[in-house]
Image (cartoon, helix red, strand yellow):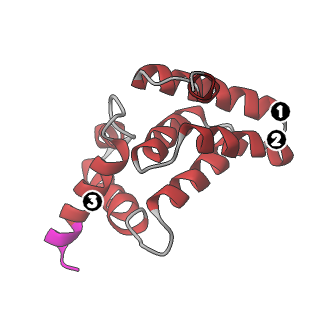
């Protein structure tokens, strides 16, 4: 893949994952410190790593949600919950992935992750998973 194709793939992948995220997923912040490095990081993450087709984007983002929950990284978790929902994960699947992390990170990180998730749902104007199933 040449550099022009990589740049386009980077833009397309970043847009698909993070288009609902106000302020982007870090790139704008990175550019304030080092524009060239920010471009290189973005091309690696969005253009090379996140665009691989070994697993689906949905699987990749659910893995990110699980990892970021256990690591207790709220800002990144917020971005990747948006991304998971943007690539087809259901609200129930995201909640289940977060709940499953109680085994690995404990209840405090699950509670914190659910708080982040609640804020994301509010930003998106979407109902909580239990509210949706109760309405049926």
Residue drawn at 68 percent across, 37 percent down = 72
Q: Which mark is residue 102?
A: 2
Q: Residues within 10 Å of mark 2 (few under 14, many from 20)?
A: some
Residue drawn at 48 percent across, 46 percent down = 84
Q: Are marks 2 and 1 in contact (CB under 8 Å)?
A: yes
**Could you tell me which secondary element the residue under label 3 belongs to?**
helix
The Cα–Cα distance between marks 3 and 1, rounded to whole angstroms, is 36 Å
Q: Is residue 125 above or below residue 20?
A: above
Q: Position of residue 16 (x, y in %)?
A: 31, 50
Residue with the most extreme left position: 4
The Cα–Cα distance between marks 3 and 2, rounded to whole angstroms, is 34 Å
Q: Indicate yes or no whether the magenta region holds residue 4.
A: yes
Left or right: 51 as drawn, with respect to 90:
left
Q: Is residue 99 above or below residue 40?
A: above
Q: Position of residue 49 (x, y in %)?
A: 43, 66
Most common secondary structure along the magenta stretch: helix
Comparing 35 with 3, the one in front is 3
Q: Quadrant of the C terminus?
A: top right
Q: Which mark is residue 84?
A: none
Comparing 95 with 13, the one in front is 95
Comparing 10 with 62, the one in front is 62
**Could you tell me which secondary element the residue under label 2 belongs to?**
helix
Q: Position of residue 123 (x, y in %)?
A: 42, 22
Name the front one of labels 3 and 1: 1
Magenta residue span: 1-6
Q: Position of residue 17 (x, y in %)?
A: 37, 48
Q: Which mark is residue 10?
A: 3
Q: Residues within 10 Å of mark 3 (few under 14, many from 20)?
A: many
Residue drawn at 60 percent across, 46 percent down = 65
Tag 1 residue? 107
Which badge, 3 or 1, is on the more N-terminal residue? 3
Is residue 71 visible in the rendered image? The answer is: no
């Amino acid at each position: 893949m040449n550099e022009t194709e990589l740049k386009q793939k980077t833009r397309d992948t970043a847009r698909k994952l993070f288009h609902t995220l106000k302020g982007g997923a870090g790139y704008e912040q990175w550019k304030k410190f080092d524009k060239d490095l920010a471009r290189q990081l973005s091309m690696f993450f969005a253009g090379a790593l996140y665009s691989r087709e070994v697993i689906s984007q949905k699987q990749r983002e659910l893995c990110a949600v699980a990892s970021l929950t256990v690591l207790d990284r709220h800002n990144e978790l917020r971005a990747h919950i948006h991304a998971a929902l943007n690539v087809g994960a259901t609200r129930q699947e995201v909640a289940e992935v977060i709940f499953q992390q109680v085994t690995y990170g404990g209840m405090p990180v699950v509670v914190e992750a659910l708080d982040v998730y609640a804020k994301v749902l509010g930003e998106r104007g979407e109902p909580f998973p239990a509210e949706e199933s109760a309405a049926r």
